[in-house]
């Protein structure tokens, strides 16, 4: 910092640094930008984790459905079972009569029972109390 005497005999200060306000504003701007950046990374990480869980649930659903033979469909219960080699994962298979609910425009809901079709519902529950993955399929009643 230099102090000079001006022609009208006043002493002036010239500064070549930043003021405290400028430094605080710059720090606040950097903090906001860093917060936005880190939240984007966290959201990407959550999406990747959810994608991994969906892939694992699809693999489990495929292996469960492959393991179900047509003669086993009769003896299926609605009990929840743990998945072997996948700690924390469980699945539940339900077979019930298929009831279609139809709502025509500006009319009441109608239910239509279809005795020739059954509804197979496979629910795969991931660990950590995450949202379950549900697969619904219709199968001919004569296969049961």
Image (cartoon, rainbow, N blue to C red):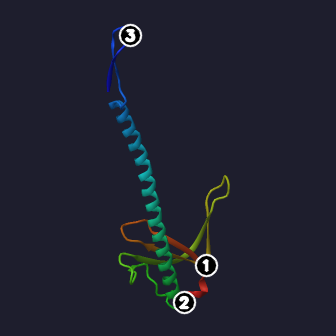
The local secondary structure at tag 3 comes to loop
Residue 32: x %, y % from top left = 41, 43
Q: CA distance from mark 3 to mark 2?
A: 105 Å
Give the residue number, with chain letter if any, for mark 3: 7
- Give the farthest residue toward the bottom: 71
Residue 75: assigned label: none
The number of callouts visible is 3
- Residue 104 drawn above or below residue 123: above
Q: What residue sits 41% from the left and 48% below the top?
A: 34
The local secondary structure at tag 1 comes to strand
Task: Give the mark nearest the N terminus, 1 or 3.
Answer: 3
Q: Is residue 75 left or right of residue 114?
A: left
Give the residue number, with chain letter if any, for mark 2: 70
Labels 2, 1: front one: 2
- Give the farthest residue toward the right: 105
Labels 1, 3: front one: 3
Tell me the quadrant of the picture where the C terminus can be found.
bottom right
The local secondary structure at tag 2 comes to loop
Tell me the quadrant of the picture where the N terminus can be found.
top left
Residue 129: x %, y % from top left = 37, 66
* Of 68 and 7, the residue lying toward us: 7
Q: What residue sits 49% from the left and 79% below the top?
A: 59
Task: Give the mark nearest the N terminus, 2 or 1.
Answer: 2
Give the residue number, with chain letter if any, for mark 1: 117
- Residue 5 drawn above or below residue 85: above
At label 1, counting other C-alpha atoms closer than 10 Å, the crowd grade (few under 14, some 14-19, many 20 or more) is: some
Residue 108: x %, y % from top left = 62, 56
* Of 114 and 67, the residue lying toward us: 67
- Residue 76 drawn above or below residue 17: below
At label 2, counting other C-alpha atoms closer than 10 Å, the crowd grade (few under 14, some 14-19, many 20 or more) is: few
| Res 122 visible | no
């Amino acid at each position: 910092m230099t102090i000079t005497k001006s022609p009208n005999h006043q002493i002036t200060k010239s500064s070549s640094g930043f003021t405290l306000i400028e430094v605080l504003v710059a720090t606040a701007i950097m903090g906001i930008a860093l917060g936005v950046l880190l939240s984007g990374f966290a959201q990407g990480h959550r999406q990747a984790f959810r994608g991994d869980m969906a892939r694992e649930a699809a693999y489990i659903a495929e292996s469960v459905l492959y393991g179900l033979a047509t003669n086993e469909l009769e003896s299926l219960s609605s009990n929840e079972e743990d998945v072997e080699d996948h700690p924390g994962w469980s699945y539940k298979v339900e077979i019930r009569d298929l009831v279609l609910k139809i709502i025509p425009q500006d009319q009441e809901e109608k239910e239509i029972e279809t005795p020739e079709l059954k509804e197979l519902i496979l629910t795969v529950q991931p660990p950590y109390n995450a949202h379950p993955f549900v697969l619904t399929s219709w199968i001919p009643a004569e296969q049961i």
